[in-house]
Image: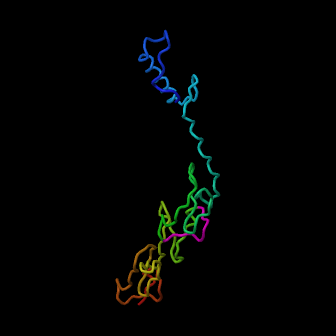
Amino acid sequence: VGGTCNGPPAPAGTMASRAAWWPRTCAFLALITVAGVDRVAGLESDASPPPPPPPSPPPCPSDRAFVDGLCVECARGSYAVHEPGALAECRSCEDMDRLLTTVGPGASSPDECVCANLRMERVFNGTAYRCVCPAGTYFCEECDHCMPCPAGTYRSTSGLEPECVSCSDSDPHLTTVTTGATSFAGTYR
């Protein structure tokens, strides 16, 4: 604010002394500054109004997200998320399951996340998708995908179990004719 709080001497006939007039002047100047008034009684404030907020970017198409000021296609393995009141963003399918990806770039929803291994099945667990091995297979942890149950074993449920059930658990003379059996009924003597 222009001026100082030292102020000139009190005008003649208005106040008894400069000491009585000076605090009122400083309080008045402070009020002008706090209120953000630009001009009052010839005094100017150094304060300027805040700049307007930047304009909101235009909405991105459903298969794109806002990255570094541009609408871009989400990379392979991710999909665009459009939430009310927020800028579109890309999210990774791996956030749901490390075995998920997309067929290519430009996915527009988690529904486009697929299992990276085509032998796996994508299932919805109530909150997110995950990949599991279908019945007749087991999850090979070393190779990170599903393998058919070997002859003499079976698996009747889908999941990520690391081994199949042996037919010989109930009778040492039982086996399966082929690999990938899905039930004990597929075992033979």
Residue 66, percent from left and from top? 59, 57
Query: Which colour assignment does the render follow?
Result: rainbow
Q: Residue at x 52, y 66 (%)?
A: 93
The correct choice, above or below, for 105 with respect to 176 in the image is: above
Residue 105, percent from left and from top? 60, 68
Residue 130, percent from left and from top? 48, 67
* Left or right of 54 on screen, residue 187: left
Quarter location, residue 41: top right
Count numbered badges in the picture.
0
Residue 105 magenta: yes
Principal SS element in the magenta part? Answer: loop
Quarter location, residue 110: bottom right
Residue 113 magenta: no
The correct choice, above or below, for 178 with respect to 89 in the image is: below
The correct choice, above or below, for 101 with respect to 8 in the image is: below
Quarter location, residue 76: bottom right
Residue nearer the viewer, 64 or 162: 64
In the image as oriented, which residue stretches furthest toward the top? 13
Quarter of the figure that contains the C terminus: bottom left
* Left or right of 99 on screen, residue 38: right
Residue 114, percent from left and from top? 55, 70
Q: Residue at x 58, y 60 (%)?
A: 80
Residue nearer the viewer, 141 or 32: 32
Magenta residues, start to end = 99-108
